[in-house]
Amino acid sequence: MDLLTFGKTGWGDELFYATLMTIAVAIAAMLIGFLFSLIFTPLKLSNNKFLNFIGNTYTTVIRGVPELLVIYLLFFGGSGAIMYVASIFGYFEYIEINAFMTGSVAIGIISGAYSTEVFRGAIQSIDKGQFEACKVLGFKKHIYFLKVIMPQMLRLAIPNLSNVWQITLKDTSLISVTGLVEIMRQSYIAAGSTRDPLFFYSFAAVLYLILTFISMKLINRLEAKYSRGF
Amino acid sequence: MDLDLMIISFPKLLSAALVTLKLLSISLIIGLFIGFLFAVLRLNKNPFINKFAYGYSYLFRGTPLLVQIFIIYFGLGQIEWLRSTFLWVILKEPYWCAISAFALNTGAYTSEILRSAFQTIKPGIIEAGKSLGISNQIILYKIQIPVAIRQSLPAYGNEIILMMKGTSLASTVTLMDITGVAKHIVSTTYKPLEVFLLAGGIYLFMTFIIHNLIKYLEKKYSFQ
């Protein structure tokens, strides 16, 4: 337990900040994922074959390729790709993207594929009559989406989104390969310098368990809130 | 795009795909046994056994696979007295460490899949068996298990794909699976885009095959 004290002698404060970093990456990734699903869910639901194809390609490819590979590709290939784009615009300096950005974007792309599937499923399971009723009543498109479809969709989507959140939270551990100091990386550093890997990795496992436990409790509350009246 | 590099690294990645497949199949087989055992324990009426099985699946589903691999590979090897037991045969090899982590992980998910499959069997089917005077054991083997397997096929197919993606973590404990080889090639050529895209393509192809295999099985064993 001495190893976990705060201050210069222990690893308590380092692990505490690392936990905050894990939470930050997970939330950023989840939000980026929502952005991606905001773009790709309509594509997947579209009647246009080409748009449909783009949407399906995104979810199929990302869900069929290991997360670690996506992270490697973005981490090692990302700066090269950005420099290539920059060179087109006449900028030839070396560009380094920081680990937090690459990490959140990489995990965000992955979590986006999962949440796209969740939103697609939720919208598709809303009764067709609801859409027709809105049209008959002459609602404007954005109003009927916001006031009628969205609340029902959220209720259906939240249980599955909670799974996506758990996956995203656990995927953040893979970011440690890029050197970003989150729980896994900090445990690796601590285990290396104290030669006590068993203790620190087990403690990391406990931290993840606490995070998943707390988030499950919070999500259950959210779920109760959105299923009012059902 | 460096096409030559892609052509040169393709056979290397393909032979690494064999390592991935080996890791996957061995851990799936062991995981299936573990999953079946814990699914039965979960359905046990004794609260202690029940809670124990729940704790197992909660522990392994609530922590990242990477932590589990690291605890087994780096952590358990640190305990002195373990080195003199037979477990050391497993723990000194990264290959078997990775497999045991994968098997324990997929076992936890499989137990949940099988448990829910057992619980969703319509009671009418079992009652029909009982009213025909079939013994409980035969009801289990000839009715409950086949129906449960059929019901868990789609979810288990997803689990196989998740596990296949999970095997890429074996590269973090020095194993040369597809990701490991791809990373090695990148570190010597520094052409990340070509090599990782190629590796991704191989993974995608494997996902495609598994997906269609499960679909075929689902059709074959459908209730119609």
Image (cartoon, rainbow, N blue to C red):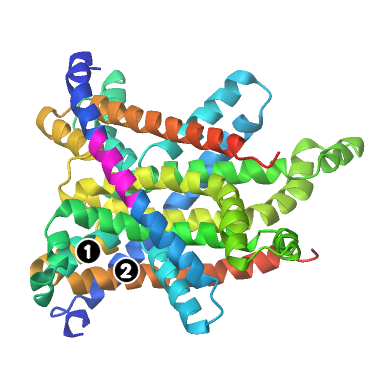
Task: State the residue position of label 2.
Answer: A205
Tag nearer the camera, 2 or 1: 1
Question: Residue B148: image x %, image y %?
Answer: 58, 54
The amino acid marked with disc number 2 is Ala
Is B26 within the magenta?
Answer: yes
Q: Chain of mark 2?
A: A
Q: Quadrant of residue A128?
A: top right
Question: Residue A79: image x %, image y %?
Answer: 25, 34
**Quarter of the image where the N terminus of chain B is located:** top left
Question: Outermost residue, top direction?
Answer: B4
Task: State the residue position of label 1.
Answer: B72
Is A200 within the magenta?
Answer: no
**A183 up-or-down from B84: above or below:** above
Quick one: SS at disc 1?
helix
Residue depicted at x 69% and y 62%: B126
Question: Outermost residue, right direction?
Answer: A137
Along the viewing direction, whichever of A58 and A18 lies nearer the viewer: A58
Residue depicted at x 13% and y 55%: B93
Along the viewing direction, whichever of A174 and B54 lies nearer the viewer: B54
Question: Residue B167: image x %, image y %?
Answer: 30, 46
